[in-house]
Image (cartoon, grey):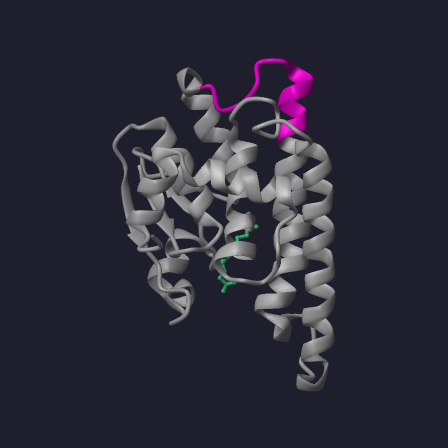
Amino acid sequence: MKLYYGPGACSLGIHVILEEIGKPYETKAINLREGEQNTPEYKAINPKSKVPALALDDGKILTEWPAIAGYLAATNPEAKLVPEDKLEWARSTEIIAYINSQMHGQGFTRIFRPERFSPNPEEKDAVRAEGKRLFAEGFAIMDKALGDKDYLLGHYSIADAALFYVSFWAEGRKTLDLPPRIAAHYARMQARPAVQRAMAAEGLS
Ligand SMILES: N[C@@H](CCC(=O)N[C@@H](CS)C(=O)NCC(=O)O)C(=O)O
């Protein structure tokens, strides 16, 4: 398997999951700042010009964070990265879908790439402010979901890897102060050897 990732991008969460599984895999860094995601070479891997993309051993390519995380969890059951209980399994999907589409797609993207929401430079600050509001709202919702538990579902799962990458954007990129219980979750995640290895591999530690 080969993970196509951007250092510090949402693909960091998939990098963490691969490290948790602990089986050999390759990586290829894509320079998003330089626009490498838009080159014909990368578009041949993912025509959507996004990371993460996962190349499987038989040459098939999987894209979209929730699909990749779900596939890795399902094909590595011994790693126990998703709950066996069907409702709890649906809860992990519910959390990942919200983080991926709302916190990332609607919130953080407005902060990081405001021009994608309005071509008018005068509206940049307003777009960023709305992004920050949505991002903060997301963390408040995640704070309630986490409660006083160590991990979102009571035990470690792919949902925690999703919460980790948005927490990294808040804390590591200084876009937002995390609610205390989410900050504790972020610290708990950073203490995991798999997270430390993924961060080091991406040059983030
Ligand atoms: N829906 C995609 C979103 C992936 C995404 O937005 N990736 C960002 C990095 S966090 C990216 O590749 N951005 C490059 C660009 O938009 O040009 C997924 O879930 O994988």
Q: Position of residue 12 (x, y in %)?
A: 43, 47
Q: Position of residue 176 (x, y in %)?
A: 61, 59
Task: Report the magenta residues as a range.
Answer: 80-92
Q: Residue at position x 47%, y 59% from top?
A: 49
- From the top left corner, tell me how far across and down residue 198 is, in percent: 34, 43
Question: Which quadrant of the structure image shows residue 204?
Answer: bottom left
Left or right: residue 161 versus residue 5 is right
Q: Give the residue drawn at x 42%, y 34%.
A: 17
Residue at image position (70%, 33%) is 145
Q: Nearer the viewer, residue 185 or 113?
A: 185
Q: Depth check: give the residue in front, 188 or 30.
A: 188
* Residue 141 lies in the magenta-colored region: no
Q: Considering the image in quadrants, where does the N terminus appear?
A: top left
**In magenta segment, residue 84:** yes
In this rendering, the count of numbered labels is: 0
Residue 95, percent from left and from top: 65, 36
Residue 142 visible in the picture = yes
